[in-house]
Amino acid sequence: MSSPSSSDGRGVAEAERSPAWTREYEGILDAYEKAGGKPDVLQVPRVASAVISASKVLSVNEIEGISIEAKETEHGVQARITVAPGTRVEHPVHLCFGMTESEGLQEIDSQFEIGEGADVGFLAHCTFPNAVKLKHVMDAQIHVGPGATMRYREAHYHGPEGGIEVLPTTHAQVDEGGRLETEFNLTEGRVGRMAIAFTADVEARGAAELIAKAYGSGDDDISVNEVVRLNGQGARGVTKTRVAVRDRARSEITTTAEGNAPDARGHMDCTEIVRGAAEARNIPIVVVRDDRARVTHEAAIGSVSKKELETLMARGLDEEQAVDVIIRGMLRG
Amino acid sequence: MKRELLQVEGLSVQRPGAEVLRGVNLRVGNAEVHALLGLNGSGKTSLALALMGAEGYRAEKGRILLDGHDITHLSVTERAQLGLTLAWQTPARFEGLPVADYLALGMDEPSRERMEEALEAVALAPRAYMGRAVDGALSGGERKRIELAAVYAMQPRLAILDEPDSGIDVLCLEDVISLVRRMADSGTSVLLITHRDEMTNVADRASLMCAGAVVKSGTPEDVRDYFARRCRPHEDLLGSQPWGAEAGGTYQRVIAEGARDE
């Protein structure tokens, strides 16, 4: 393992706690909190965690059954997280990625290897509170072993300026009987430009559930492209997308579900709310290559329902407040 | 009648293809339970929406006074902020909005105690419902009770309850009646819209709507009796939009004859 680590929960050797380290660590933890993270959790020894600021690995805490290797690169970090077969992880692994600078590039290459029969959750917060001209590129490879379960929730905070490009690309392989649940959340602050590309290959009796939620404003640009290939008998796949755009923001959600094997079941569910001069598109693509497979989709794009709006206004909320309650609820649901 | 809180004077509302309210006159007193009876399609819900200021139901003629203030041209929000609210006949659903948050929306000073009291008032266990979302996972009956609880928690000056008994089984009618009485006892006026005669038992006064107009107001007994004698026998014949051309003027004759009987 190349990154500093220790068993005291702060995950760094005493000698490395220089004033500069402390400043950067505290800075990224402030940012982490803005993204919804709880800094105290990063101090708990029994919770596996990693804190990465720009291209620095500030802390790593490993626990039994979870190995986190992190290597600093020119513009970011390469990380490999391995969960040993059969490991049942009680608390989610906490990951903090971010930059406190206003400009720059962060590239994260990550690999997740979830061993056979393991069960693990991840809680990742990506935070760029001061972004004016920033680019965050993430390339992730996920392998969920046979019968294993991985739950990955990622929340982003990009600050109020919208001067950021977020480009995450993920490929997931879910082996027989495995289960992958992911949730991507960008509902506070501005989005900037975001292009999510996610592909999942699901083998027999495996399942993948991909959830993406975003709230765009100003001239934010949201693009989500998800592909779920149900390759094995009885494989299951669901994509659920909840997006709201207002002002001049744009969103384009493309989801593809392929039923490539007997008894495969796929479903795509997209709801988008549009306000002002914003624009939303949804492109569901259904591909079925086996006559015993079934793939369905549902989409609703439009303004807020008049009845929902008037119900909340009849409680005393003005129209903007009511719209906000409806959108926040949709993004939470 | 108790001191007037709501006065509706000659209110007319036009919808595409139909005049749904035709010169409605109605008075509701302070802390009074006022039952509004009428067959399906008589204009009760249209009146509720017009009183609340819903889009598409703005007054073409006439005016609405709340405690002497003309609210005819105010928005839904402004009316609500003056203490007027509506429990919809078929309540909206809100994905991801917890019941507790929904109840708190209309409360000046949200408190857990008040929210729990509101849920208990509609016979829902607070612990089981506070954290649930007000969405499609709830049954119609549960959603209806939560809507009533939200109105109760808000402590409005005037609550319009549009058929609070629909979608709730007969055994639970007592819960609804008890809730209405509690609201009135705490100072809220209730305009109770219903087409079930027995619901008028809880009312202090009542009015009967027919063909988009209030044709009779008085004691609940009088209005119920009139409703039973003059309207119920014609229910099948009159259909859901009795004043439409397809009714061939039957409805107008019934009302006119009824009025002459008085």
Image (cartoon, coloured by chain):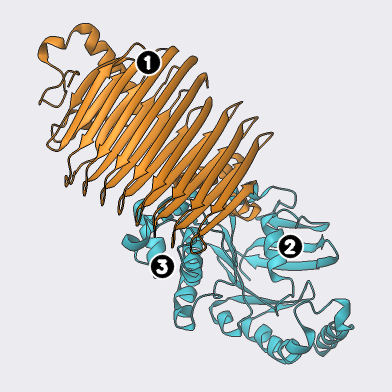
Q: Quadrant of residue B133?
A: bottom left
Asked if residue A185 is positioned above or below residue B234 in the image, the reply reads: above
- Which mark is in front, 3 or 2? 3
Asked if residue B63 is positioned above or below residue A58 in the image, the reply reads: below
On the question of residue B97 being in view, the answer is no
Q: Chain of mark 2?
A: B
- The amino acid type, in three-letter code, at marker 3 is Ala
Q: Can you tell which mark lies on residue B8?
A: 2
Between residue A10 and residue B53, name the one nearer to us.
Answer: A10
| Helix, strand or loop under label 3 | helix
Image coordinates for residue A254, horizontal then vertical, percent: 56, 41
**Comes first in the chain, label 3 or label 2:** 2
| Helix, strand or loop under label 2 | strand
- The amino acid type, in three-letter code, at marker 1 is Thr
Chain B rendering hue: cyan
**Do the numbered discs 2 and 1 sit on residues whose CB atoms are within 8 Å?**
no
Mark 2 packing: few (<14 Cα in 10 Å), some, or many (20+)? many
Q: Which residue is mark 3?
A: B121
Image coordinates for residue A272, horizontal then vertical, percent: 58, 44
Disc 3/disc 2 C-alpha distance (Å): 30 Å
Q: Which residue is mark 1?
A: A100
| Helix, strand or loop under label 1 | loop
Chain A rendering hue: orange
On the question of residue B38 being in view, the answer is yes
Q: Residue at x 31, y 48 (%)?
A: A175
Image coordinates for residue A80, horizontal then vertical, percent: 26, 28
Left or right, B108 with reference to A233: right
